[in-house]
Image (cartoon, coloured by chain):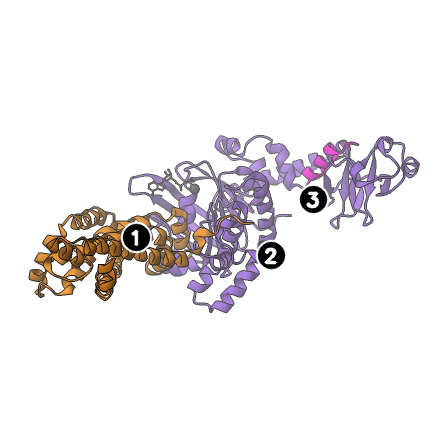
Chain colours: A purple, B orange
Amino acid sequence: MIRFESVTKEYPDGTVAVDALSLTAPTGKITVLVGPSGCGKTTSLRMINRMIEPTGGRILIDDRDTSSIDSAELRRGIGYVIQHAGLFPHRTILANIATVPLLLGWDRAKATSRALELMDRVGLPQSFAKRYPSQLSGGQQQRVGVARALAADPPVMLMDEPFSAVDPIVREQLQDEFLRLQGEIGKTIVFVTHDIDEAIKLGDQVAVLRVGGRLAQLAAPEELLSQPVDDFVADFVGRDRGYRTLGFRTASFPTSTEPTVRLGATVEELRAVSNDRWVLVLDDNDHPVGWVEPDRVDGSVSRDALHRGGTVASTDGPLRQALDAALSAPSGRGVIVGPDGVFVGTVRARDLIAPIEASAASERAAADAARTEPGGSGEPGDLVVTEPKAR
Amino acid sequence: MDWFTSHLDDVWRLLVVHAYLAGLPLLLGLLVALPLGWLARRFSWAYPPLIIGTGLLYTLPSLAVFILLPGILHTRILDPVNVLVAMTVYTVALLVRTVADGLGAIPEDVRLAANAMGYRPVRRLLGVELPLAVPVISAGLRVAAVSNVSIVSVAAIIGVEQLGSLFTDGFNRAFFPPIVTGILACGVLALLFDVVIVVLTRLMTPWTRARAAS
Ligand SMILES: Nc1ncnc2c1ncn2[C@@H]1O[C@H](COP(=O)(O)OP(=O)(O)O)[C@@H](O)[C@H]1O
Ligand SMILES: [Mg+2]
C-alpha cells in the first residue's frame, strides 16, 4: 500500500506542481493518476521513489516513510516504466532486463535465467535476447521496459504513460496484455496517463488531478463515469459517460434460441433450419464464427462467405458488450456465448433495455446511500477499492 | 630512396620513440580528462572554467612549453618526460570538452531510467554513461592522436630525438630525403593510431552497428 499524506511539491521556481495530495494506492491494485498535461502526475509518481523529493507531507509504502529509506535501495525495490521505455542502447535485451537483479548482486546465471523467464512473460521471443534495443519496434521496446521493471519482482510498480508513444492498435494490445499480466502478478501499481479512456480501462481506482496538482476526484472507474463530482471532472471524463458506464455493469438478460448451422453446411441445410435472411454459423466446437446469407451461398458454407461485422458478447461480460453485439449483428440479434466461448443464444437490443435500466437504478440507489452515510465514498482521498473489478 | 634504405634502422628507432612520445600521453590525457569532463558535466558551475581553461591550454605554443617545462618540473632539458607531460597537457586540452559533451549527449530518458532503477552515481557513470559516450570520446581521441603526432615533432628543435629530428637534420644539411621520410613516417604513424582507435571503438560499441534487422 502506498499512502500520500498531504504531499506537496513546490519547485524552486515557485511552481506548485502537487498541492496537499492525499490518497492511498491499495496493495495489489492499479491506481491511475489522470489529468491534463502539467497537472503534476509525473511529479507525484517520481516522489514515490524519491527521484523528486516532496517539499511537504510524506509518502509511506506499507507504513514505512520513504524518506527514511536510502534512495537507491528504495528504487531497486520499485519497478519503473517510462514513456519511451528508456532502455540502455548499449546493452542487449537480456542485459537490459537483468539490470536490477545485477544491481542487487544476484549471480549472473540467476539473473539471466530470470530475464529469459520475463521475456516469456511479456511475450517477447527468446530470439530477441541478444538483440539491441534499436533493433526492436516501439511496442517491443515497451515490453522490454515492463520486463525490466519486473525483473527483481518488486511489489510496487510505477508507470509513467508507458503506452502513449505507440500506435493505437499496439497500445490496445499492450493494455490488454498488461491487464492479463497484472491478473497473474498482482502488483501494487501507480499508473500515470493523460488519456481518460486508458485510465478507465486499466484502473481499479482513478485519481483525477487538476492543474496545480490538486485531487479533483478519486473513485472507481464506473463511479467516475456515473458521478463526476464537478464540471471539471465531468468535462474531463468526456461524452458518452452514460453509455460508457455500461462497460462496468453486468446483469443477467434473457437470450433466445437461434437456429444454427456448422461450417460446411449446404444451401439445403441452411434453408431447412431457417427462412430468415441471416443464419448463424458455428465451428465444430460450437463457437460462433459469423453470419451467413443463404441466398448468397454457393454450394456450402465456407469461412469466406461469412459476415464478420458482428461482435460477440459473453453472458458474464458487461452490458455494453451485449448491447454492442446486438447493434453490430447484421441480423439485429446479438451473439451471446458462455464464459467458455460456446454459443448460448442471441439477444435483441430491446431486450437489453430493461436490464440496463434496472442496473442504472440500483447504481443510483447505492450512490444515494453512500452520500448520506458519513465517511462514504463521497469523501475524496479515503477510497479503498475492496471489490476486484470484473475482467 | 637510397638514403631511406640505408637509414632504415634509424628511422625505425625514431618512429618507435615518436610513437611512445605521442601515444602514451594519449592514454594519460584520457585518464585525466575523464574526471575533469565528468566534473564539468556534473556541476554546471564547473563547466565554463574547465572547458575554457583547458581549451586555452591548447593555444600555448608548443616550443615555449618544451623550453619552459624543465624549469617547472626540475628536469633536464633533454628528458623525454618534458615531452610526455606537454603532450598529456595538449591531450587533456582537447579531450575535456569531448568527454563533457559525450557524457552530456546521453538521452535524458536513459539517464532517468538508470536513476529509477537504483544506480548510484559511480556505477551509473561506469556502467551506463561512459559506455554510451565512447563514440564521441573516440572521435575526440582520433583528433588528439593526429595532433600529438604532429606536435611531438617540434621537440626536435630542443633536441629530443624522434621523427622530427629528420626534419632538423634535413634542414641543416639542405638535404630532402630525410625530410620526406619524416613526413611520410609521421603520416603512417598517425594512420596507425587512427586504425587502433577505430578498431578498439568498434569492439567496444557493437550496439552502434545493430540496426533494425528483424
Ligand atoms: N524541474 C521543474 N522545475 C520547475 N517546474 C517544473 C519542473 N518539473 C515540472 N515542473 C512543472 O510542474 C508542473 C507539473 O509537471 P509534471 O508533474 O511533469 O506534470 P504532468 O506529468 O502531469 O504533465 C508543470 O507545471 C511543470 O511545468
Ligand atoms: Mg508527465
Report the disc number at residue A317. 3
Q: Which residue is mark 1?
A: B142
Task: Compare marks 2 and 3 and give the one earlier in the sequence.
Answer: 2
Residue at x 38% of width, y 42% of height: A18
Whole-percent x, y for residue B85 in the image? 17, 60
Dot 2 corresponds to which residue?
A184
Instruction: Establish whether ligand 2 lies closer than 8 Å to the Cβ of label 2.
Output: no
Q: Which residues are magenta?
A: A316-332
B95 relative position to A368: left or right: left
Say which element carries label 2. Answer: helix
User: Are both tags, 1 and 2, on one chain?
Assistant: no
Foreground pick, A90 / B15: B15
In this rendering, which labeled residue sits more in front, label 1 or label 3?
A: 1
Say if A323 sits above or below B13 in the image: above
Asked if the residues shown at circle 1 and circle 3 are in contact, with their CB atoms under 8 angstroms apart, the answer is: no
Distance Cα–Cα, label 1 vs label 3: 65 Å
Cβ–Cβ below 8 Å for labels 1 and 2? no
Q: Position of residue A376 (x, y in %)?
A: 53, 44
The kind of residue tagged 3 is: Gly
Residue A322 pos. (x, y %): 72, 38
Residue name at image x 11 percent, y 64 percent = B78
Q: Quadrant of ligand 1?
A: top left
Q: Nearer the viewer, mark 1 or mark 2?
A: 1
* Residue drawn at point x = 64 percent, y = 33 percent: A243
Distance CA(mark 2)–CA(mark 3): 20 Å
Q: CA distance from mark 1 to mark 2?
A: 53 Å
